[in-house]
Image: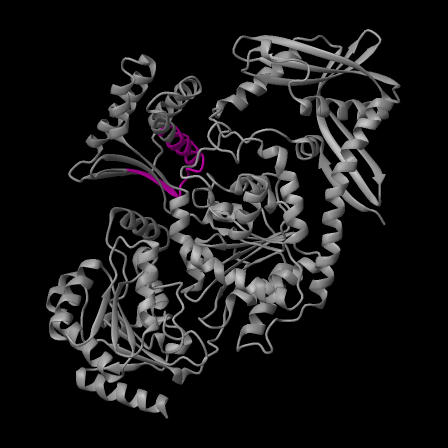
């Protein structure tokens, strides 16, 4: 039975025949709309002998494949006894600069339509016409050729022969891949406790076309337990492509390593790791124009050769592999990696590439539902990230700046920016006695002002590429376009608010991202949300776009409970109003804990200020104990230096860090690199306007405002920080929780099962005795 392939005429031509430069020069969002109108104007200029937008389809057999080619011809004209296939192209380029050989892809599309139509109508001969319409000057230029069915057939199959090289590559690869998947066993000798159940649950979820929300404790092997069944589902024909989504670059390495482990056991699978354009660009500054980048110049002349090269020779295509082949073939590494995604079985990337409407991979998500599986790592992070993705703000100060800048350059633009500036000033009267306002109803006036300004900016940006402020103006244009895009999502789950910080802001703020996330999930087959801290799980199921009939699961910890000593000091309040009185008490608890056993410890705080004040007092009292301190502006190299200190264990070291920061999740300090964590406070996010707006929304909607806005996010920070201590079955360590709220019923309800055997600490003496007992037991 021949393998069935479907492709559009446009995609066939653009892939096989693409050539020339990669050019990201600004074109303007409204140009597409103007192009559509230009097409319609040309089509409407003919009489009844002209048919517009004619759907054509042709299925044929070739080299063991059944190929269906389909598309829509712009026009078919009956000109006397002649039939003419018309391909319309709109342009802003002077028609004097366009000749018959201006763009071979245009002829190629027209010839494909002519061949398909000639076969359908059994024509021996047909005319092919290119119509170029200049949208700026309302003029057309027409080229026409008379071609026989034999000439068209020769051209058509020359295209198909080139395309079949790629089809055959993919077809042969699919056979190789699927055979390896059938033979693939779980890549470790045994399953950890709960691991088999998780893998089975993931497979069943994919089979049933559902979503799964799973809390899986640290050490269970979440990544391999989700990847393995997802890979198996590809071999069963259930899954077309896996997207492994992460919040942080560091967590991608675990996914790469897991895929590598399966590859070492015989798996053949194409995996592409996507890296942000700014990070992977070979140049000091991202400027994707042929004049400024040798990798952009002629990119399309070379990219197909680069693709074939890497697909033949590589399976796990990391950033380093993309860079190596990008240099070898002189192609843009970012665009090259996006093209590789089309051929990949698994894509490892940031959440943004699936969920963010401004940067998502539209080449995958515009065609409707596909059998994609989304594996969403550290899914607790997606709540705040989603609110960020689906919110946007604008500032007053740039509007005033550009009102002045354009005053003598473009009076119309100056006026538009002036109107935006005036609107922002006007919002201050909505503040009342506060420094902010919150409105549920949409403010239509701002949308109209933004839309008119972007339209004027488009014209200016097209004509003023050499202006000294061009890049800054381009940035504000994209911000305004982003504002209009988010505006389209605005519903009862949003508010718009204004605030006067260093500048007056106006923001479209997404309170509840569940609907937009749910709509995105519908573009795939299944999504697996997993984290060690998906607590409470029903909250995450709701807020992350799950439906009532989606699945939830809680996996047990694979480690023996005796490996973790959990202690709660509930005789101290770390509430903001009480903190000043707690510094010495906190220091004493830290001292007692770290002097019980030599080793490395983390102490996590709810804020930098609190941390720094305790740090100073601890150092004054304990000059003999080594300490390190997280600061708020650490770069990647600073982070590595900080973590490198944990490789030394010849003396006690205490690391001071903040809850929810870069050291409280996503790091592995195995064995005696870390033997304890002290967590000060319940991790509540700082009180702020946005958190309070979210609280009011969910209080009104479900009577759980404080829980959704403060309590649950805070407790997830605590659980993440505590999870740094026990990473493998051989690890042993302690966690000390300091706050009276940990002893309350509401918080104990959020404890994972392995925390149920906690030890209550009444005072320092009590802590000393219990620590001694724990360490003596574990040493024995």
Quadrant assignment for the C terminus = bottom left
Is residue 610 in view? yes
Residue 69 on the magenta segment: no
The residue positioned farthest toward the front in the image shown: 328
Residue occupying image coordinates x 25% and y 72%: 654
Instruction: Give the magenta-colored segment's residue range.
Output: 476-497
Q: Position of residue 635 (x, y in %)?
A: 31, 53
**Which residue is painted at 40% across and 23% down in the image?**
454
x and y percentages locating residue 591 in the rendered image: 19, 78
Kindly indicate the quadrant of the structure image that contains residue 748: bottom left
Colour convention: one colour
Residue 611: x percent and y percent? 20, 63
- Please indicate whether residue 142 sits to the left or right of residue 757 in the image: right
- In this rendering, the count of numbered labels is 0
Percent x, y of residue 436: 22, 39
In the foreground, 692 or 50: 50
Which sits in the foreground, 311 or 695? 311
| Residue sitting at the far bottom | 780
* Residue depicted at x 14% and y 66%: 616
Q: Is residue 596 left or right of residue 67?
A: left
Tell me if 610 is positioned left or right of 733 in this view: left
Residue 512 can be seen in this image: no
Q: Could you say which quadrant of the image residue 123 lies in?
A: top right
Q: Nearer the viewer, residue 124 or 681?
A: 124
Residue 724 vs 513, above or below: the answer is below
Res 342 quadrant in image? top right
Q: Is residue 94 above or below residue 368?
A: above
């Amino acid at each position: 039975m021949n393998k069935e392939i479907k492709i559009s005429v446009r995609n066939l031509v653009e892939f096989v025949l693409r050539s020339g430069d990669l050019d990201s020069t600004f074109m303007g969002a409204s140009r597409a709309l103007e192009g559509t109108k230009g097409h319609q104007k040309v089509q409407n200029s003919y009489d009844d002998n002209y048919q517009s937008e004619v759907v054509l389809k042709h299925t044929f057999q070739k080299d063991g494949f059944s190929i269906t080619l389909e598309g829509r011809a712009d026009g078919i004209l009956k000109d006397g006894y002649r039939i003419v296939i018309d391909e319309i192209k709109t342009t802003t380029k002077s028609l004097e600069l366009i000749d018959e050989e201006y763009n071979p892809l245009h002829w190629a599309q027209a010839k494909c339509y002519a061949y398909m139509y000639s076969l359908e109508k059994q024509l021996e001969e047909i005319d092919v016409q290119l119509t170029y319409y200049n949208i700026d000057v309302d003029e057309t230029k027409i080229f026409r050729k008379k071609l026989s069915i034999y000439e068209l057939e020769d051209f058509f199959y020359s295209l198909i022969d080139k395309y079949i090289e790629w089809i055959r590559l993919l077809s042969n690869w699919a056979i190789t891949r699927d055979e390896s998947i059938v033979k693939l066993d779980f890549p470790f000798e045994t399953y950890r406790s709960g691991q088999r159940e998780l893998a089975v649950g993931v497979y069943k979820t994919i089979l049933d076309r559902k979503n799964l929300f799973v809390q899986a404790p640290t050490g269970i092997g979440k990544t391999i337990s989700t990847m393995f069944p997802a890979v198996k589902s590809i071999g069963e024909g259930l899954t077309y492509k896996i997207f492994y989504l992460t919040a942080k670059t560091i967590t991608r390495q675990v996914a790469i390593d897991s895929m590598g482990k399966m590859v070492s056991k015989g798996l053949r699978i194409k995996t592409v790791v996507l890296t942000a354009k700014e990070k992977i660009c070979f140049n000091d500054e991202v400027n994707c124009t042929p004049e400024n980048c040798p990798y952009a110049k002629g990119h399309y002349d070379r990219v197909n050769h680069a693709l074939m090269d890497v697909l033949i020779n590589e399976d796990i295509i990391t950033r380093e592999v993309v860079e190596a082949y990008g240099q070898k073939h002189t192609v843009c590494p970012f665009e090259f990696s996006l093209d590789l995604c089309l051929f990949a079985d698994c894509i490892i990337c940031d959440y943004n590439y699936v969920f963010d409407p401004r940067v998502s991979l539209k080449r995958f998500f515009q065609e409707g539902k596909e059998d994609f599986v989304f594996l969403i790592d550290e899914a607790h992070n997606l709540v705040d990230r989603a609110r960020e993705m689906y919110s946007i703000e604008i500032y007053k100060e740039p509007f005033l700046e550009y009102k002045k800048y354009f005053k003598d350059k473009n009076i119309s633009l100056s006026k538009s920016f002036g109107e935006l500036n005036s609107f922002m000033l006007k919002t201050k009267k909505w503040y009342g006695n506060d420094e902010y306002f919150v409105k549920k109803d949409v403010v239509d006036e701002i949308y109209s002002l933004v839309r008119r300004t972007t339209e004027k900016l488009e014209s200016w940006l097209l004509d003023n590429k050499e202006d000294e402020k061009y890049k800054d103006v381009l940035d504000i244009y994209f911000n305004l376009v982003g504002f209009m895009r988010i505006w389209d999502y605005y519903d009862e789950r949003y508010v718009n608010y204004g605030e006067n910080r260093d500048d007056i802001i106006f923001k479209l703020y997404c309170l509840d991202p569940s609907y937009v996330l749910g709509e995105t999930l519908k573009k795939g087959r299944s999504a697996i949300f997993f984290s060690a801290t998906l607590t409470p799980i029903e909250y995450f199921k709701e807020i992350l776009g799950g439906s009532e009939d989606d699945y939830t699961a809680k996996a047990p910890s694979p480690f023996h409970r005796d490996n973790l000593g959990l202690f709660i000091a509930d005789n101290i309040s770390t509430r903001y109003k009480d903190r000043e009185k707690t510094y010495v008490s906190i220091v004493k608890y830290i001292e007692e804990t770290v002097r019980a056993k030599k080793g490395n410890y983390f102490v996590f705080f709810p804020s930098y200020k609190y941390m720094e004040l305790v740090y100073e007092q601890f150092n004054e009292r304990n000059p003999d104990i080594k300490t390190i301190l997280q600061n708020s502006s650490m770069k990647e190299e600073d982070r590595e230096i900080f973590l490198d200190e944990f490789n030394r264990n010849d003396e006690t070291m205490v690391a001071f860090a903040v809850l929810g920061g870069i050291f409280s999740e996503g790091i592995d300090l195995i064995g005696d690199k870390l033997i304890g964590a002290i967590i000060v406070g319940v991790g509540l996010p700082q009180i702020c306007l946005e958190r309070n707006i979210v609280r009011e929304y969910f209080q009104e909607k479900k009577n759980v405002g404080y829980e959704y806005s403060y309590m649950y996010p805070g407790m997830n920070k605590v659980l993440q920080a505590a999870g740094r201590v026990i990473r493998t079955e051989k690890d042993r360590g302690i966690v000390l929780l300091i706050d009276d709220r940990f002893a309350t019923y509401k918080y104990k309800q959020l404890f994972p099962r392995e925390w149920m055997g906690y030890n209550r600490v009444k005072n320092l003496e009590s802590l000393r005795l219990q620590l001694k007992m724990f360490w003596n037991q574990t040493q024995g």
